[in-house]
Amino acid sequence: MSKPIVTGILAYGMSGRVFHAPFVATNPAFKFKAVVERHEKKAAQRYPDIISYNSIDELINDDEIELVIVNTPNYMHFDNAKQALLAGKHVLIEKPAAATSAEVKELFDLGRKVDRHVMIYHNRRWDSGFVSVREVIESGRLGELIEVQFRMDRYKAAIGPKQFKEKKDMPANGIVYDLGSHLVDNVISLFGKPLSFDKVTATHREGSEVADYCSFRISYPNQLNVYLSASLLSLEPLAGFVVVGTLGTYIKNRSDVQEDQLVAGMLPTDPGYGVEPEGSEGKLVTIGVDNEKIVEWMPSHKGDYTLLFNDVYHTIRNNALFPVTEEQVAWQLELLEK
């Protein structure tokens, strides 16, 4: 392995504390050098050797930093990523990459111009449930796919404190860009560019300015229909993954434990990290040779966001293709922005 990638994180709220810092701090491929903390200085309590800058400008102007993780509020992603690229940094941008496909194209074009990598952080590709769904689909055991349903359910009736998600005048707001971006990315990573799509949004929470429900119907070749939905008012989450084919059906709850473990302080190097508890298995129903129904309970693979950061390393050091490609991100934003 060549030298570690010197990394800075633009914010140390939940995103920085949970989804980024533990990975760049424990992975020998990275050197976690700095964060931006405008008010409370909390990062050093866990990472005493890092620098806590007071501003984004200070971190981006640190000549030693090679990679900037852009995890600021959604509406700031485009400007912050552009600033970092112009300063000669590689960027890993939290989803959504930007508010529009035009902005994303500008970032990728700029990355090529300055010879720096633009990578989009879509960690849900490394969730245990999605990895398991992908394996079942790719195994061919379901036959020709007829219908796919992915959903993300939450219950958050109160208006959240993060204004950039809740204000209608903030770009890339609401559930479409928050949870919808995960769902759309999952589907595009499996099936590629859609033939067509319809989108429905609704607002049900009292006093809400933005959509708190969204639903997509996406069409693919061979009459495959994909249905995506996300809600902030779902008290009892339904199955997160349902895949129906001519030879079988697969049903799986969203049981990935990584976020909860990271919030509780578990490190990604812990042996139990990413391992779903017993009882979280997916249900695979297929047809036997005598047309009898066969039911199997399929254990999930371990979820592991570490693999995303390994891909970041290989992209920067070895010029490998990052798995979340430019085309996929552009297709995703076309669905989100319309």
Image (cartoon, rainbow, N blue to C red):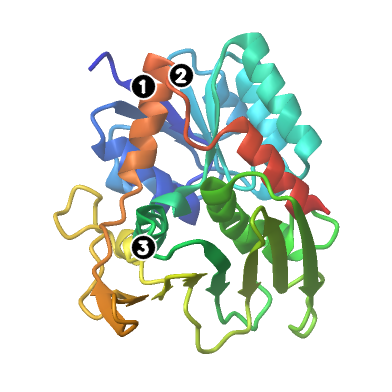
Q: Nearer the viewer, residue 197 or 37?
A: 197
Q: Residue at x 39, y 51 (%)?
A: 126
Question: Of the residues tagged 3 and 2, which is closer to the observer?
Answer: 3
Disc 1 versus disc 3: distance between alpha carbons?
41 Å
Secondary structure category for the residue under label 3:
loop
Q: Residue 141, which numbered label?
A: 3
Q: Residues within 10 Å of mark 2 (few under 14, many from 20)?
A: many
Which residue lies under the disc numbered 2?
A: 66
Residue 113, located in which quarter of the rendered image? top right
Residue 63 location, x and y as percent? Answer: 48, 13
| Residue 293 drawn above or below residue 159 | below
Q: Quadrant of the N terminus?
A: top left
Tell which residue pokes out farthest to the left in this image. 271
Which residue lies under the disc numbered 1?
A: 5
Q: Nearer the viewer, residue 325 or 270?
A: 325
Q: Nearer the viewer, residue 317 or 187?
A: 187
Residue 241 in view here: yes
Residue 58 location, x and y as percent? Answer: 56, 25
Q: Tags 1 and 2 in contact by the CB under 8 Å rule? A: yes
Residue 323 shown left or right of residue 50 in the figure: right
Secondary structure category for the residue under label 2:
loop
Amino acid type shown at disc 2? Glu
Disc 3 versus disc 2: distance between alpha carbons?
44 Å
Amino acid type shown at disc 3? Arg
Disc 1 versus disc 2: distance between alpha carbons?
6 Å
